Image: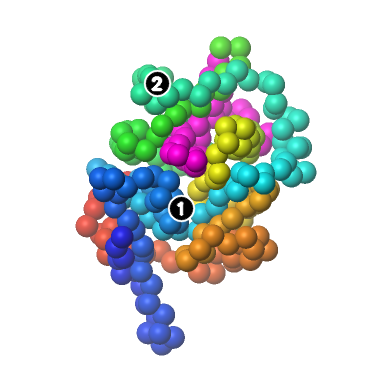
Amino acid sequence: MFSSEFAHDYGSYTFAYGNYCERESGDTIAAIYRSGYLPYSGSQGVKNIFYMARSARVALTDFTLSSENRRISKKFDGQFHKQRIVFADFNVDESFISFCLAYFADKHGSVMPRERLQDIMTAGIITHIVEYKKDERIVAYVLEARDGNIAHYWYSFYDLAYTQQSLGLWLMLDCVRDAHQDGLAYYYLGTVYGEKALYKTSFEPLEWWDGESWNTGIAVLKDRSRSDSERSVERIDCWKKGHELY
């Protein structure tokens, strides 16, 4: 584990650091996630680095469908043919790459160049690709990492014809349900920053990393997310300056 100086406000004695860890031989993905870290993919060629952030996970032992979960499930349940494919058996061909890049270009802009996607696919973290089809046509992919009794919904890519229909939320719900049925303990959903990420609070029971421990205070999480713009700064920490960013 290591820290990298980020910013400071000496007047209030506030000193900020980015927190990271490096996966070494013998380290498990489950232990890294449990400690509040997520896989880093923001710099070219960087491997085995994880960053600490405000992330969320579903405690699957007591998982139940919320009213929002039930609403979304009625829209898409039974519409697609699903396969959870072991990553080693999945063919990462040009059609897959093009599908994923087109999704990110249209949905999020230029944050996922081809080189970044290739780094993600070779990071040694993905264990399964969840593939969804309708009438033999690809509808979506989910990149999933499983280790022991945990799993992480890392990235999803889907047909943008479904954007206004909340398919993205249904994909996450479908994977959470699978993890629950498989007897896993936790399903990690990634970061929760800004109002756009509050859809993740529709899962119950939800826990979020507060920098020290897993917190169950959802009202606090919502308040922090809604006020994130007040704390946002355009700056990178010292460690990132030594790497070429995507």
Q: Which mark is residue 192?
A: none
* Crowd band around label 2 with a 10 angstrom C-alpha radius: few (<14), some (14–19), many (20+): few
Residue occupied by mark 2: 90
Circle 1 is placed at which residue position?
A: 34
Considering the numbered disc 1 on the image, is that residue within a helix, a strand or a loop? helix
In the rendered image, residue 87, in percent from the top left (x then y), is placed at 39, 26
Q: Which residues are magenta?
A: 137-166
Residue 75 falls left or right of residue 18 = right
Residue depicted at 44% across the width and 29% down the height: 128
Where the N terminus falls, by quadrant? bottom left
Is residue 152 located in the magenta-colored stretch of the structure? Answer: yes
Say which residue appears at 58% left-offset and 51% top-offset. 197
Give residue 47's quadrant in the image: top left
In the rendered structure, which amino acid carries the disc numbered 1? Arg
Residue at 36% in and 69% down: 17
Mark 1, other Cα within 10 Å: few <14 / some 14–19 / many ≥20: some
